[in-house]
Structures are given as structure tokens and as C-alpha cells.
Amino acid sequence: MKISFLILNAYGMGGTIRATFDLATELSARHDVEVVSVFQHTDRPFLPLGAKVRLRSLVDLREGARVRWPYTKRAERLSKEPSALIHPEERAYASFSAWSDEVLQRELRRLRTDVLVTTRAGLNIMAARFARRRVVTIAQEHLHFEAHKPGLFEEIRQWYPKLDAVVTLTEADERDYRGMLDRTRTEVFTIGNGLPGGARPVSRQENRIVLAAGRLVPVKGYDRLLKAFARVVEVRPDWRLRIYGEGRVSDKLVRLAVKLRLHNNVVFMGPTGDIEGELAKASIHAVSSRFEGFGMTIIEAFACGVPVVSFDCPRGPREIITPGHDGLLVPPDDVDALAEGLLRMIDDEEGRRRMAANALRTAREYDISAIAGRWENALAELAR
Amino acid sequence: MINVGAVPPGARRAVTSRVDDDDTLRIEWPEPDDGKIVLRHAETGREHEGTDLTGLTAGTWTVWKHGEPVATDDPGFSLDGLLAYAGRSRGREVRSVRTAEGTLAVLVREVEPYVEVIKVRPEDGVIAVEGLIAYGEPLGGEHPAGLVAAARKGPETTGAGTVTGRRFAGSVAIEPMVAGQARRRVFWDLFAEIRGVRLPLAARLDDVTDKKSRVRFPAQRVGHVRVRPYFTDSDSLAVACTIEEENA
């Protein structure tokens, strides 16, 4: 079977890219798999992709890149014009242009593949509108149902019924999409993200370190994590918080940490290519997100024997964490509750070790081979 | 496939890989293994046989067994362990680390006694520092000590402190540091003065690289001079005194 994944930009770093690469790599053992990146800004992808997966891009943003004749002038002109096909409320709207509209449309009308998996709302809608009839179209939603703004949501409601299937990361999303797609031919499946196989370093629970990881953007709620941690160190001054990642609110967060006088306890570690190695040095993983489409870092932490303290935010964490068994869920947006949860995990060393052991077992359920198997079952069902 | 680098899939992986206090490399396997451990110096290719690491030259050593790099699942990192290891006089530090590829490496570097900074409190007109003597002899009982601030190519000022065993605590007033400052920016290096010997203050017993940009201390102000501690390129603790621009 030929399977094509369409992704915004395969050359960056982030949860969607990692999940798509891991799934594509696993499926490539049995299928002909390609990843099509709408944009390309560097020579090589940052994250690892299996050797059997083909990677190509549609719009080359690298310096000196030229569009071949006879499109050169047209590309130059249209690149400066805003996209007319992507809804302005699509979070990545600014990346798109009239030129990417044209290239994407051409690509979708031409693409001969058995299955096309698109990975965000704007691309899902494009697939619904322009993909060839024979192609099985599957829209993947890495954001949760309520994350879409009303205008974009109207487009989703209008176009998703033309798709063969929507694959959600959480069961809560599945329920919402089933409600929306009631009485249409579109199937809805829940398939979480998978964890690639292979050995991992395992935390010995020996360092008084809490770890958080993810882009430094408002949705990750690091401002609240810093405030909660300021309360933690009042009681447990020898505990440290390490935040991995970079992003546009980094300066703001550094200033907040200084204001909260966390200079002895908090370090912004920057991006890492070895998050598992870093997780294994820590004892607790903190998730302070306002929304979490799935919560892949929770599963990565589990796989390294690190229990999680997380806001019970929509929607991923509660479907992964079993409170008291492999982590703790605290009421969302509640800084005091997060501080309390962290302190509870810090102070109950025996419980923490037990949860760490359970976390290792929970992680096995998300093994990529199991996840790929579920995708293959869904594909078989759709092919009938 | 991912994160295993040169290690063939299915290779046996160490459960524990640490350097003990006596500079022995302790590797534990899931089941008994009698293979010979060989270390290879990354820079020169020179080889060292066995797990006794005393006398290894400085640099990065990769660890091999049965002709393959040793893979390990031990993060090989303990903040308390690093502090304990530095608890006595040594000329050389040997650390085991797990590389991003999941293999075992040994880092060796020459060390001299200094004070490992645990806490810095820049407030109330002083800079107070707590730390532990690293790679030097601890003192029995409690002794008076000093916290010296020395301007680069300039004057010095000293505040009071104490040493109890390994533990150093001291503070220095910032007012004398800024008095009469003419240059826009003056940098001061900090030292613990213990029995007439100056030990640098630094934070090196962890894995945080580039502390200069990663750790940011609060600033204090004396008149129009901003006084902010920082870590230097060599992770030593220093202080920058900066005359603030009118419009800044």
C-alpha cells in the first residue's frame, strides 16, 4: 500500500512532526511510505526519519531557492500574496501564501497514492477539497476539538464530511467529531501517538529535579509552572526545575523566574536532541499546559520511568495518566493545586518510586508497533 | 534505529555505569559478563584496559567491550554523587556519562580546589554565597573565612564568612564595589578566602552547559549602578557592575 503523509513543515521540531515521522518509519517496514512537507527551510530534517521513508517538499524557503521556469516570476509574485484557500484562523495561516495555495492544489490534484494522511486542519480541508477521488483521505487532528476558532470550525464542518476518516488522538475528541459527522460517511477513529521501539535510559529517582519540556509558548503554561515552583521551593529549597525548549516567550519567562527569585532553582536548558536522556536524569515530569492535544511527553516520561504531575487540561493527560498509579492530575489553571501536587510527589518518595515503576508499564501500551497495527486495522476497514 | 547510534540493535546494555569514589568504573549487566573493558581516548586513540581509571589522562574516553561501544541505560548522573565525589582532595575528576547515542563515555579533567556554589542570594545590599569546598581538604570545626570581590585590574573588597567542614557561607557588600565607578561596566571576580588561600567560586558539579546565558540572577541597584552576579564562560561566579544609561 502506498501511504502519503502531508505535513506543514517536516524540517522543524515539535510533537506533530515527531509523531508523523515515527509512524511513517514504522509503517515503512510493510508499506511504501512518503512524507510530503508543504514547506522546507533547512537542508535536513531536525528529527530522525526512517531510511525507507521518502521525504519531499513543495515550497522551498531556503535562501537562494528558485522556482523552476516557467513558474519563477509567478512564484515570486504569489509568494507575497496571502493565502486564499487556508482560513485565516488556521494557526499556521501566516506560513501559507497564494503560491503555496497553488502548489498544494496542484499537488493534491495530481497525487496518486492509496492513502493520504493530512496532519492539521488547514491541510485536512485542502485534502477534502482537492484530493483525487480514488485516494483514501484521512484527516489527523493533533489539536483538540475545541481548539479551533469559529470561522475555521465552520470550514471543518463543511469539508470534513468529504473525507474518508478523521483520526483523533483522544477518545474525548472522537466523541465530538462523531457528533459533528453524524449521518455522514466519514469514519472516526481514536489512535494515539506511538513510542518508537528501542532501549531507553531509566531514571533512578536520585536527583531532586522536576523536568518540563516543550516549546516556550503561552499554551504550555510555563508562567504558571514557575509560580507553582516558587511555592515548592519555599518548602523544598533543594529541588530544581529544568525547562527544555525554546520559543517566543522565552525572555518573558526568564524575567518572571528572576522576579520570582528562582535563580537558584530554575534553569532554562534550551532545546535538546536527547530528551529521553534528560528525562532519565529527573525524578518528576511536570505538565502545566492550558491545552494538550495528546501529551506525547507524558508517554516519553513514563517510558523513562518518570511519573508525571499534570494539569487536568483538555484533553490528553487524563486519558494517559491514572492518578495515583503513574502520576497525578491536578485541577487545570490552579497554581496552588499544581504546587501541592508537585510537593505531594516530592515528599512521597516511596509512592514516587512505585509510580515510576507503573509508568514504565503504562508506556508499553503506546509502543509504536501497537499503534501502527491500529492504523493498519483502520486502513483495512476503510478499504472495504 | 533512534538514539542508539553505533550500538547494534539487540546489543546487551549496562544497567549501571558509574565511577566510584576510588575511580573504579563500575559496570553492572543484566546477567554476568566476563568481557574485557577497554577505554579509548577520543582525541588520540590511545587505549586503556580495565576498569581502574586512576591516572587516566584528561579528555573524553569511549568505553568498549567485545569490540563494540558499551551501551547503557544508566543516565549516569547524580547531583548528590558529583558533590560527594568532590568531597576530598583530588587533582583529577573522572565522570561517567551516557551520551545522546546511549553509549558510555568517561570524561576526565584536571581539577584544583574551589568552592562549588550552591546558592547565591543577591539582596539587601549584599551578595551572599553558600557553597561546598570541592576537590580540597575540608576543615574540621568552624573557621572564619572571607568572601573576596576583586575587580579585574582594580581594587578588592572583602566580606565576612565561615567554613564548617566543607560548607562555606559568606557575603560581600555591594556598596564598596560601586563606589567611585567611572567605567561604564566593571567586572568583579569572587573568591572564598579560607586560611589565607583564595578559592574560586564556581558551579561545575552538574551537566548544565553555558551557564553564562542559562542562569540569570536578579540585579540590585546602588544609585545608577546595576549590580548583577553572573557565571563566566568557565562557570565561575562573578559580578557585573553597570552604570545605567539615562534613557535605558
Image (cartoon, coloured by chain):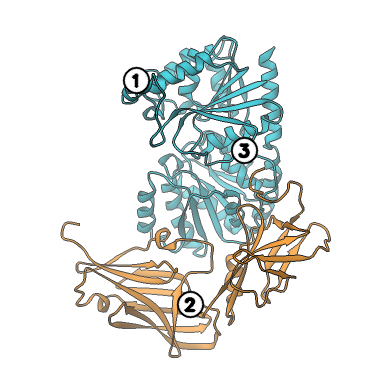
Chain colours: A cyan, B orange
Helix, strand or loop at mark 3: helix
Q: CA distance from mark 2 to mark 3?
A: 44 Å
The answer to whether A362 is drawn above or below residue B126 in the figure is above
Pointer 2 chain: B
Q: Residue at x 63, y 52 (%)?
A: B101
The amino acid beneath tag 1 is Arg
Q: CA distance from mark 1 to mark 2?
A: 65 Å
Please give the name of the residue rendered at 53% of the width and 65% of the height, measured from the top-left corner: B206
- Specify the amino acid type for callout 3: Ile
Which residue bears the numbered disc 3? A320
Q: Is residue B95 left or right of residue B35?
A: left
Q: Which residue lies at the image location 46% right of the left edge and 61% below the top edge?
A: A265
User: How many numbered marks have been drawn onto this rendered protein structure?
Assistant: 3
Q: CA distance from mark 3 to mark 1?
A: 48 Å
- Name the chain under label 3: A
Q: Indicate the secondary structure of the residue bearing disc 1.
A: helix
Front disc: 2 or 3: 2
Q: Is residue A86 visible?
A: no
The quarter of the displayed image where residue B60 is located: bottom right
Quadrant of the frame with the N terminus of chain A: top right
Which mark is nearer the camera, 1 or 2? Answer: 1
Which one is nearer the viewer's eye here, A233 or B86? B86
Q: Position of residue A91 (x, y in %)?
A: 41, 29
Between circles 3 and 1, the one closer to the viewer is 1
Q: Which mark is residue A74?
A: 1
